[in-house]
Amino acid sequence: MAFSDTQPLINKNPVLQSYYASLESRIGYRLILGGTRHFGYYEPGTWWPFPVEKALRRMEDHLFETLNLPAGSTVLDAGCGYGHVAIHMAHRKLNVRAIDVVERHVARARINVRSAGLEKAITVQRGDYHHLEDIPTESLDGVYTMETLVHATDPEAVLEGFLRVLKPGGTLVLFEYAHLFPKDAPAASSKLFEQVNEYASMPANAQFEPDTLVSILEEVGFTDIQTNEISEHVKPLARLFFLIAYIPYLFIRLFGLEQYFINAVAAIVAYRYFDMHRYLCIRVSKPRTADGHALEPKKVQ
Ligand SMILES: C[S@@+](CC[C@H](N)C(=O)[O-])C[C@H]1O[C@@H](n2cnc3c(N)ncnc32)[C@H](O)[C@@H]1O
């Protein structure tokens, strides 16, 4: 898996960079999730969320099973964070090309990949999933995202890029959030949600209602769309985040410090208004033409 020598194109996104640079993000994720940055997978109704690490790995198993690709397939991990998901995929014999837009995440992912002895199976590069120009057309068997598309400033362009780099018949899997705030939702819920989207740099989260991603995927040109909602499976960890954040949150509100402790605010809004949130696992395919070749991505207007 060769990379070009040119610098990758990276959209300037100072809010995203400062969100991930904040002490709250760095320490919080490290202490609670060991540096992984996604939800764990539990049986619905589970009250005791420990050990968290096992639940994180179960979520990665769920991703691997959803991808359903044979050993030796090459996949893109778009928004790889510290590389834990990529490492789990490589342990299951996938080759992974991992990219992340935050330099510190890339550096940490490389260290983790080296410690796992998986340098041959995983390459890690700084990259923005809005700009996959570096990746040849129709070169990958699969692409996945794990809890990152909410950060996209142009989700349509991202999905068009994924379609381009996939081989005909290739698979895209998205494990992502959506929400549905009814018109009569308490004003406080919408205000907190807006704060989370603004300070954690999640513009697409404001846009993603349960059907939004599916509509964009169809418009871009993906087929065989399968959606599985697993919100109840992530509830135990959402509850744990809520309990940890609750007392600090009272002080955060009192002193108006939401901007600096936005993960605590997110923990409150995600669990207090749990019914308005959805955790979606979406699997789609790139269509084949009669001659086995790919169709051009449809341009989303
Ligand atoms: C919530 S974390 C998930 C990380 C990883 N997938 C995991 O499950 O541990 C979201 C990740 O997406 C990355 N990210 C955000 N916007 C990105 C972009 N435009 N291109 C590539 N990575 C991006 C962030 O830097 C962060 O590492």
Image (cartoon, rainbow, N blue to C red):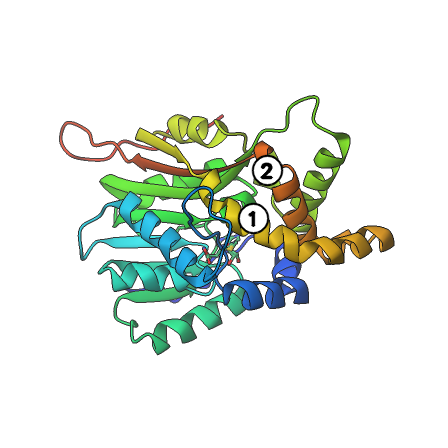
**Residue 254 vs residue 156, the one in the foreground:** 254
Query: Compared to 56, does 274 lie above or below?
Result: above
Residue 205 percent coordinates (x, y) = 58, 39
The local secondary structure at tag 2 comes to helix
Residue 174 percent coordinates (x, y) = 40, 42
Q: Residue at x 54, y 30 (%)?
A: 209
Residue 117, image quadrant: bottom left
Disc 1 crowd rating (10 Å Cα; few below 14, some 14-19, many 20+) is many
The local secondary structure at tag 1 comes to helix
Query: Compared to 194, does 31 lie above or below?
Result: below
Amino acid type of the residue tagged 2 in the rendering: Phe
User: Is residue 41 shown to the viewer in this render?
Assistant: yes
- In this image, 70 relative to 38: left or right? left
Query: Compared to 281, does 105 lie above or below?
Result: below
- In this image, 280 relative to 137: left or right? right
Query: Compared to 116, does 20 lie above or below?
Result: above
Residue 25, image quadrant: bottom right
User: Is residue 135 shown to the viewer in this render?
Assistant: no
> Label 2, label 1: how many angstroms apart (C-alpha)?
9 Å
User: What is the count of numbered marks?
Assistant: 2
Amino acid type of the residue tagged 1 in the rendering: Ala
Disc 2 crowd rating (10 Å Cα; few below 14, some 14-19, many 20+) is some
Q: Are marks 2 and 1 in contact (CB under 8 Å)?
A: yes
Mark 1 — residue? 238
Q: Quadrant of the N terminus?
A: bottom left
**Residue 298 vs residue 36, the one in the foreground:** 36
Residue 30: which numbered mark, if any? none
Mark 2 — residue? 274
The tag earlier along the polypeptide, 2 or 1, is 1
- In this image, 41 relative to 101: left or right? left
Residue 141 percent coordinates (x, y) = 24, 48
